[in-house]
Image (cartoon, grey):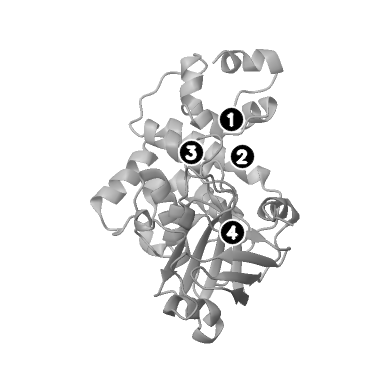
Amino acid sequence: MTRVASFEEDTGMKLNLANFLDYYHLDPRSIYKFATFSRLCARADVIDDFNEPLEEMMAKAMARLAVIDSRRWISFLLDLLPRLDNVDFHKLSDLEKRMLQMFYITVWGKAAEDWRSDEVWDNLYTLADSPVLLDELIDLLKYQYSRIDFIDAPVKVGFDCPLDLHCTYTRDQLLVALDFLKPATVREGVKWLPEGKLDVLFVTLNKADKDYSPTTMYNDYSINEWLFHWQSQSTTAEHSSTGQRYIHHKEQGSRVLLFVREFKADRITNGAEAYTYLGTANYAQHEGSKPMNITWKLDAPIPAKYLKKTNKLVVG
């Protein structure tokens, strides 16, 4: 709080979230681990005290939003949030509804299964009536947008999907973006979505013994910028329906989507770490059964900054 209180005097800069984070070289998650930035400012008597009922929930949500890096999603939110109390839901495209769903589950922890629900719109209107927190959220999103240092791009998955190549998403965000509205039920590192004909693979590269049983210590890593070695679940046999779907996904008209994270837990918040979207992949070859060791060929190369993380577990 001392830093907040003396910021303008010490730096000659206007106190706002972006200036504060940049000057002290802070990751925004380090703030949201404890409180909102607005609360820190109020405690330091830099702004007037405020009382907004969503504050505790928004601090947790902003910690999750502090890693998003999709230009398309952030641009949508920056357009929508200032007019949240005057949104005509029926005029939103299917793509925009999915992006709103991603935001909704990030804040309220569950999907909006019925957009006509009074509860859903009461929640959104409560946020619209929280000027301090809403302004901070918009500032955070603008800050995140300014830090994006790579080219993101839409990925063809058969419908208007808001997930962009090499962007970062939580498990809940990416699953609702794929129209699966009960992400909390997904306990494993794979999810087959039959309606979209999508195999979603969740890969954690650095597996600590305390977090994984011997049957889930999969051997996953990039071979090079185009090839990724992935080990199926220990019960997946080569000739099973799942194994055959992996091998023959092109002929069967299904797609494989690869999401990768370095650790299970976020190093700053201790919550679940988000995933980087490596895009769609195609079967190249496999060895073994129960588990299957599959080599996937990616449709887009892994950028150099991610490649150092994804191939570091290769043992020569």
Q: Residues within 10 Å of mark 3 (few under 14, many from 20)?
A: many
Above/below status of 235 relative to 3: below
For label 1, the residue is 17
> As shown in the figure, which amino acid type bears the numbered disc 3?
Met
Q: CA distance from mark 4 to mark 2?
A: 36 Å
For label 3, the residue is 62
Above/below status of 217 relative to 154: above
Q: Residues within 10 Å of mark 2 (few under 14, many from 20)?
A: some
Q: Quadrant of residue 277?
A: bottom right
Contact? badges 1 and 2 (CB < 8 Å): yes
Task: Indicate which disc, 3 or 4, sits on the residue closer to the N terminus.
Answer: 3
**Where is the C terminus found, in terms of image quarters?**
bottom right
Q: Residues within 10 Å of mark 4 (few under 14, many from 20)?
A: some
Residue 19 location in percent, x, y? 65, 28
Secondary element at tag 3:
helix
Would residue 93 be visible to someone looking at this image? no
